[in-house]
Image (cartoon, helix red, strand yellow):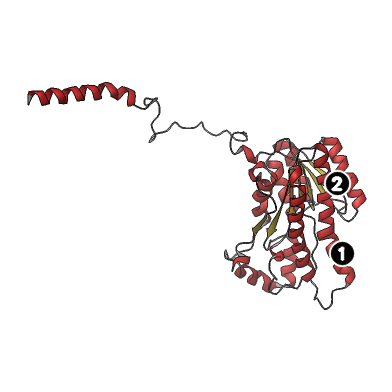
Amino acid sequence: MASLLRSSAARTLRTTRLLPILQPRFQSTHNVHDPPQGNTPIPNRSTTKRLPEFNLNDKVVLVTGAARGLGLVQAEALLEAGATVYALDRLEEPSADFYRVQKRAAEELGTTLHYRQIDVRDVEGLNGIVKGISDMQGKIDGLIAAAGIQQETSALEYTAKDANTMFEVNITGVFMTAQAVAKEMIRWNRGGSIVLIGSMSATVANKGLICCAYNASKAGVLQLSRNLAAEWGPYGIRVNTISPGYIVTAMVEKLFEQYPERRREWPTQNMLGKLSMPHEYRGAAVFLISDASSFMTASDLRIDGGHCAW
């Protein structure tokens, strides 16, 4: 018995001597159940240490169709992420909201929103503007091609002229814009990210919406992006698309005045039972332009409330 007690005591002593070595380091200052508290947040203080892959500081990004609407909303998101943004649009004068965003960029965000008037069908003028921006900035890092038009006309009544205009803006214009930007990206040997705005209408025929040429043009945009991604991948250029669902814009609000039943019916056609707002596409724009999507190309980011998944 005495031998057993001595043996047990020896084991206890050896265990006791080992305990300090096995104790977690910094136990006195860190407890997993009571971790150190962060400092009180300071308003308007930015940081580059939180999800830095989304940071667009020092990036130069072009956004077509950004004088108003979805293009402008996405341009503002890029500005908030730190980018210098050039808005390209055919309007002689951008919307009043554009000047609010431009002022905010300079005074609050410490960056710049520029405006260049151009119709994407004017290829020579488009190339000149893109090259001029590239020369001035010494690079172009990204493009969001959001310029596009829509027309509701029965397929039996569509004219060749109207169809050609639709395709010239929505496909050829997008193609030529991407081409102009890609040439500059290759010239500077920096790679980059190109985002083309498609539509859920590239995937489905919209119930009760007569727009065959528009839907065909957006399907073309999705296939265009895949092929551009294949050709330009070796240069480090990524090409993806965003396919929005129904968005409530000023243009759509006017459409609801003409077709009030659509305000009631459209929300019932997706899984969330509502229509989207332009701000719900802000994050997608920053994600695809930034390094957060660095291994993503030839993909379509469909944001439609589940409309196409029924």
Q: Nearer the viewer, residue 17 or 69?
A: 17
Residue count near mark 1 (Cα–Cα under 10 Å), binned few <14, some 14–19, many ≥20:
some
| Badge 2 amino acid | Arg
Quadrant containing the C terminus in the rendered view: bottom right
Above/below status of 13 relative to 102: above
Amino acid type of the residue tagged 1 in the rendering: Thr
Q: Quadrant of residue 30?
A: top left
**Residue 192, image x and y in percent?**
74, 43
Asked if the residue at tag 1 contacts the one at tag 2, i.e. Cβ–Cβ closer than 8 Å, the answer is no
Image quadrant holding the N terminus, namely top left
Q: Residue furthest right?
A: 124
Q: Position of residue 309 (x, y in %)?
A: 60, 66
Disc 2 to disc 1, how far (Cα)? Answer: 22 Å
Mark 2 or mark 1: which comes first in sequence?
A: 2
The answer to which quarter of the image holds residue 10 is top left
Say left or right for 261 vs 93: left
Nearer to us in this view, 75 or 290: 290
Residue farthest to the front, as pictured:
3
- Is the residue 10 above or below the residue 306 in the image? above
The residue indicated by pointer 2 is 116
The spot of residue 282 in percent (x, y) is 67, 50
SS assignment at label 2: strand
Residue indicated by mark 1: 165
Q: Is residue 249 placed above or below 51 in the rendered structure? A: below
